[in-house]
Amino acid sequence: MAKIPSIVILTGAGVSAESGIDTFRSEGGLWEQHRVEDVATPEAFARDPDLVLRFYDMRRAAIQTKQPNAAHEALARLDAEWPGELLIITQNVDDLHERAGGSRLLHMHGTHLTAWCLACDGRPEWREPLIDRPACPQCGAAGQMRPDIVWFGEMPYEMERIYAAVGACDLFVSIGTSGAVYPAAGLVREARARGAMTLELNLEPSQGSYFFHESRHGPATRLVPEWVSEMLGQG
Ligand code: APR
């Protein structure tokens, strides 16, 4: 019997754009509104923790008002129905994949809805602001919690598991990412070098389009349900 292809899906900010969450590098995107050096590095946090905490408090509050879109829902359907290996690796720190029902999922850049306590190294679930330096619900330490977000210059989470899955997959699909940030942007070459087919679904050509066997351009809420229907033989 033919082997069921194993699939790895990498998602970026573009998959949540139609849910009303800003992307980073599009016109008027987050990194036009804020300087990375001011809000998304460990140095920025050491220099001006209030500025950084307010930035992430604003983001954390905003994403709780947003809803998953048709792209998240289609991926959750594939996740539920695909009989072979499947892993969704998201660079996004929102919880829209989970709220759509996604389960075979990992957040390589952290999440908005957990905090990181620097006293006990715990990752408690957290939905409130951090600006008032609340106590850690796990160890009680006051003012030791930071956003559980991977900042520039920090190592993304679960890289060993990511490389193992990418190295073993038959199909690597990248959705809604610009290919501007490593190591995520290098995964397509890793997958291709290991013999996988590679597909890009993005609004426009990305910095990494060249490395994909196939690129389809358009909004995720159209491209992703179409692709998932093809995969589930309902195309
Ligand atoms: N449908 C599909 N793709 C879209 C849509 C859409 N509706 N809207 C935007 N895109 C595409 C853009 O064309 C762009 O290529 O999504 C991509 C978003 O790129 P970025 O804003 O650079 O976001 P991302 O690639 O996720 O950023 C990577 O950089 O800032 C850091 O840690 C942060 O995880 C983030 C990482």
Image (spheres, rainbow, N blue to C red):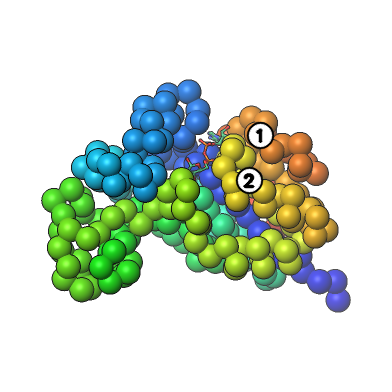
Write down the quadrant of residue 86 in the picture.
Answer: bottom right
Measured from the top left, where is residue 165 in percent x and y? 66, 66
Q: Amino acid at mark 2?
A: Ala
Is the CB–ligand 1 distance for label 1 below 8 Å?
Answer: yes
The answer to whether residue 223 of the structure is visible from this angle is no
Q: Is residue 217 above or below residue 60?
A: above
Measured from the top left, where is residue 54 in percent x and y? 23, 41
Instruction: Give the labeled residue for mark 2.
Output: 185
Given residues 13 and 115, the one toward you in this image is 115
Q: Residues within 10 Å of mark 1 (few under 14, many from 20)?
A: few
Is the CB–ligand 1 distance for label 2 below 8 Å?
Answer: yes
The tag earlier along the polypeptide, 2 or 1, is: 2
Q: Residue furthest right?
A: 1
Q: Residue at x 50, y 56 (%)?
A: 155
Q: Residue at x 16, y 71 (%)?
A: 140
Q: Is residue 192 above or below residue 24?
A: below
> Does the residue at mark 2 contact the one at mark 1 (Cβ under 8 Å)?
yes
Q: Amino acid at mark 1?
A: Gln
Q: Residue furthest bottom?
A: 1
Q: Is residue 223 left or right of residue 56?
A: right
Q: Quadrant of the N terminus?
A: bottom right
Q: Residue at x 28, y 71 (%)?
A: 120
Given residues 149 and 29, the one toward you in this image is 149
Q: Which mark is residue 152?
A: none
Write down the quadrant of residue 9 in the picture.
Answer: bottom right
Instruction: Give the labeled residue for mark 1.
Output: 207
Q: CA distance from mark 2 to mark 1?
A: 9 Å
